[in-house]
Image (cartoon, rainbow, N blue to C red):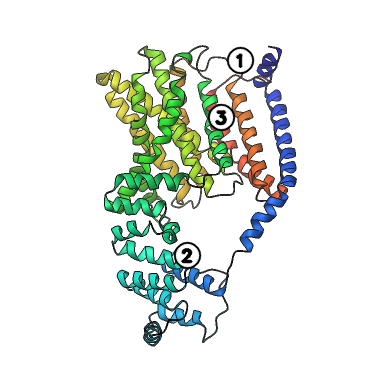
Amino acid sequence: MNFMRYLRALSYSRSGLMRSCAVILLAGVLGAAISSWMFRADRERIWETDRSMPRDDRERLYEHWFWDLETLLSGLEVLPEETADSFQAFGRRVLAGDHEALAELKQRAGVDSVPDEGVLFLLGLHHMRMGEYEEAAAAARRENELYPHGIVRHLAVDALFRGGRFRELAALSEDPEYTGALRGGKMVRIAFRLGDLPLMFRHLLIAEYEGLRVSLLILALLTGGIWAAILLHVYPRGGLRPIRFWVPAALAMGWMSTWPTVMSMIWMEERFGFVEPSGNDFFEALLFHTLSVGIREELFKLLLFSPLLIVIRRDRQRGELDALMLGAMTGLGFAVEENLGYFAGTLAGGISTSRFVSATLLHAMLTGTAGLALYRAVRDPGKWLADSITVLAMVIGLHGLYNALLSAPIPGLGDMSYFYGAALAGAVHLFFREVRVQGGMNARTVSITGLFFWGYCVLICLEMAYTTLYFPFLESVSMVGETALAGVLTAFVFLHALREPIGD
């Protein structure tokens, strides 16, 4: 009891919060230093393994040619030195359309004896450039039979895919040698082309969760768990009890809503060619992120939230607060699963801290607001339908604006991606406007402000410790610390909307 009174005093005091956060962060820095010392052997082993990967000249050449053809890279810095008579120079001439080089290549590939390594691969690349996908696949598969290599297999798969030979690819996926080139994301699109939804869903799960690191799962769950504790704290004492068992259900619904979202993304890309613009046109980015990303993500979150309307109370004020909060939990479930994808592609270094103060909060605010609008429209369509449609349009628009500000420069202003805070502020305003209307924000034993800062500091500390598995101590602290400072904007936006009385 004395401890709870002490926590209350700390959480409602600016100086108390500053001191307690300083203690948490200092403990986190010390813990990161200890973990850096403990992980030093693992860190050296990880990087040494990466450096010791076989990287002969031919492999680097394959990489360069393959990715250059895909226009993903202009070339690699680790290419072998080029001489006039080198195979690399010969390959450049072939891919540039030199007729003499091409004639020589076909002669070398068509000899009765086994062609030299790389010749059939180069021939396959030539066929790919010419749009002759069947010939490209045949050359690449023959090259792989003679000189097995992962990039050669990727070329064969790419050629078969572009040639529309999806059933052959589905059969090839059973070949253990081609599993790596076909597993997960590639097979999702192949299954879509075949119209095989069960196969598509199975490989979607493989792409999402195969090789998932437990440490990253913990960080992702923590980003959602902290916000869940913060937002549910607005209930008056005892107000959460009737729906407490439905909170994890809402989180699970939000998690599952990512699956149809990804499948709809593939449908839009494959059927209509609606892909994210590669240029720096802000208005193109705004159009794409509003009409594609915003619509599909917000509608599928709302669709998976809708079964929870059955368990939300009929009482006007409490029912609306339940809809608002269970909607927010659905948004958090979506954000947690989405965060896993972002975390899996990095070595930490501040990504979980960054997502905590940006997209995770955004998803909770937007889906909470949309969930309340849906509840009102279902309960009293005559009164609320037009207003609910307006709110949903605002939610989708804010989502699109947020993404566009992060992905393209503003005309005449350049790269001012920190303007995303304007969209975040709009989402937070919509949400907390409703919280205050529903009678939330009652004084609690521990302030919401305290929960926010303590949770944020704990997340920073854990990510610093995790980052030391891959980077030295000072570098880890610097990387996570710089990202954490960027959270000042979110802290201001959130706390301004909160308007919680905090003393000195």
**Which residue position is annotated with label 2?**
150
Nearer-the-camera pick, 140 or 370: 140
Residue 74 placed where, x, y %? 48, 68
Q: What crowding class fits label 1: few (fewer than 14 Cα within 10 Å), some (14-19), or many (20 or more)?
A: some
Nearer-the-camera pick, 353 or 154: 154
Disc 2 marks a residue whose amino acid type is: Gly
Q: Measured along the vertical axis of the image, is residue 435 above or below residue 50? A: above
Disc 1 marks a residue whose amino acid type is: Thr
Q: Measured along the vertical axis of the image, is residue 74 above or below residue 108? A: above
The quadrant of the picture occupied by the N terminus is top right
**Which residue position is annotated with label 3?**
226
Looking at the image, is mark 2 or mark 3 earlier in the sequence? 2
Query: Viewed as shown, does residue 446 lie left or right of 142?
Result: right
Question: What whole-number distance in Å separates the C-alpha atoms at marks 1 and 2?
Answer: 59 Å
Numbered mark located on residue 445 in the image: 1
Looking at the image, is mark 3 or mark 1 earlier in the sequence? 3
